[in-house]
Amino acid sequence: MLLAPAVSAADLAPLMEPAPEAATEAVAAASPWQIRVRGLGVITNDSGSVNGVAGSDLSYSDSVIPELDITYYLTDNIAAELILGTTYANIYGEGALASVGKVGKTWVLPPTLTLQYHFTDFGAFKPYVGAGVNYTMFYSQDGDAATSLDVKNSFGTALQIGADYMVNEHWGVNFDVKKLFLKADFDATINGTDYSGKAKLDPWLIGAGVTYRF
């Protein structure tokens, strides 16, 4: 009977030891920051018109560029993503303007901000959808058939669908498709005559790359 209190104390001692901080805060909460680097194909919608020229049309060159995305998770499911990349577009006359050939060239910078919903019920496979806005800036514009070319900066909207496959808690691979609705006004001077119109680029952005979650 004299030994009973000591035996009871020995049995209770492990239960009284402090828990290791809830398994180190559930292996530390995931960082809200994520980046992606992609190779991106820019496929434009060949459409446009020149005011006052019946049957006029325009087309644009496609390109392949690098792209950087920066994502911040507001919750496990909701995230905001800033999409950064720049490319160029050659502009060609089509339809009634086919004889003009290459009108000119402009560089395009369309930073795009989307709000995304991430599905979290598929393990390492993490699909998402998004929608947002972009502000497209045109710079380093050069005329070819046109002696001057001025494509105006323009606001647009964006839709997005994609998925990450996470190899571990930090690294993954990504596939992503975005559609930008982008229509810009322009002025051009060809053979001494001033023209204005609208370039309807509306590009598809199709990319694949690497994801890193901090």
Image (cartoon, rainbow, N blue to C red):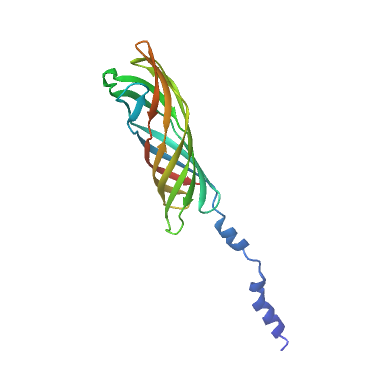
* Residue 214 in sight: no
* Residue 73 in sight: yes
Q: Which residue is the extreme one toward the top? A: 192
For the N terminus, the image quarter is bottom right
Q: Which residue is the extreme one toward the bottom? A: 1
Residue at x 42%, y 23% (from the top left corner): 186
Residue at x 44%, y 50% (from the top left corner): 128
Is 31 placed above or below 106 here?
below
Is 45 placed above or below 90 here?
below
Is 85 placed above or below 174 here?
above
Tally of numbered tags: 0
Residue 44 position within the rendered picture, expressed as x and y whole percent measured from the top left: 35, 33
Q: Quadrant of residue 157?
A: top left
**12 or 176: nearer the eye?**
176
**10 or 52: nearer the eye?**
52
Residue at x 45%, y 46% (from the top left corner): 130
Is 183 placed above or below 75 here?
above
**125 or 132: nearer the eye?**
132
Residue 166 position within the rendered picture, expressed as x and y whole percent measured from the top left: 43, 51
